[in-house]
Amino acid sequence: MPQLVIEDFAPQIVWLVITFGLLYLMLARGALPRIATVLEQRRDKIADDLDDAARFKQEAEDALKDYEAALADARAKAHEIAAQTRATLTADVERHTESLQQTLDARMAEAEERIAATKAEAMKSVRSVASDAAGAIIGKLLSDTADTDAVATAVDAELRAG
């Protein structure tokens, strides 16, 4: 093996230094600046993306605050509308109840008048029937016809008393 021959060590080391020197110069002048440029561009791009992400996050938080404020306003308006509707419906119910109460009172008054008229007529009939019955009873008991005016006067006195 030639690399293990001691006389060949000096030329091999010289060529090794020359080869690595040329390789270093080629990389230092050509490839490494391009790599450094690409790395710098990537670093700038990442920094820009992070800045954009922070800006978008702030915009999203602002939009969320605006949304929550709008939602709170909408809820307040909905409660206000519900309260107004409730008040309107309550007023309508009260008006309707009052109207029904007036109708019911009018019907009750009419019914009471009819009852009073029916009672008065029934009382007249009672007087007539009582007078006829009392006259018939007196006629049967005494075997004589009773004085109808006297019987009517006695029945009227009893009806007023009782």
Image: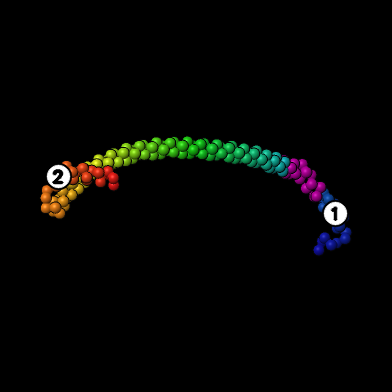
The residue type indicated by label 1 comes to Ile
Kindly tell me whether residue 67 is visible in this rendering. Answer: no
Instruction: Tell me, yes or no, whether the highlighted magenta stretch contains residue 153.
Output: no
> Residue beneath label 2, please?
147
> Is 107 or 122 nearer to us in this picture?
122
Q: Residue 51, percent across and down?
A: 67, 39
Is disc 1 surrounded by few (<14), some (14 to 19) or many (20+) residues within 10 Å? few
Q: Earlier in the sequence, mark 1 or mark 2?
A: 1
> Is 27 or 33 nearer to us in this picture?
33
Element type where label 2 sits in the image: loop
Name the side, left or right, on which 141 lies relative to 120.
Answer: left
Name the side, left or right, on which 82 lies relative to 107.
Answer: right
Element type where label 1 sits in the image: helix
Q: Residue 68, percent across and down?
A: 58, 40
Residue sitting farthest toward the bottom: 1
Compute the Cα span from label 1 to label 2. Answer: 174 Å
Q: Residue at x 78, y 48 (%)?
A: 23
Q: Residue 70, percent across and down?
A: 55, 37
Q: Residue at x 81, y 63 (%)?
A: 1
> Residue beneath label 1, please?
13
Vertically, is 150 above or below 5?
Answer: above
Q: Quadrant of residue 124?
A: top left
The residue type indicated by label 2 comes to Asp
Q: Residue at x 85, y 52 (%)?
A: 14
Q: Quadrant of residue 120?
A: top left
Q: Which residues are magenta?
A: 19-37
Q: Quadrant of residue 37?
A: top right
Q: Residue 27, percent across and down?
A: 76, 45
How many numbered discs sit on the rendered protein?
Answer: 2
Q: Magenta residues: mostly which secondary structure?
A: helix
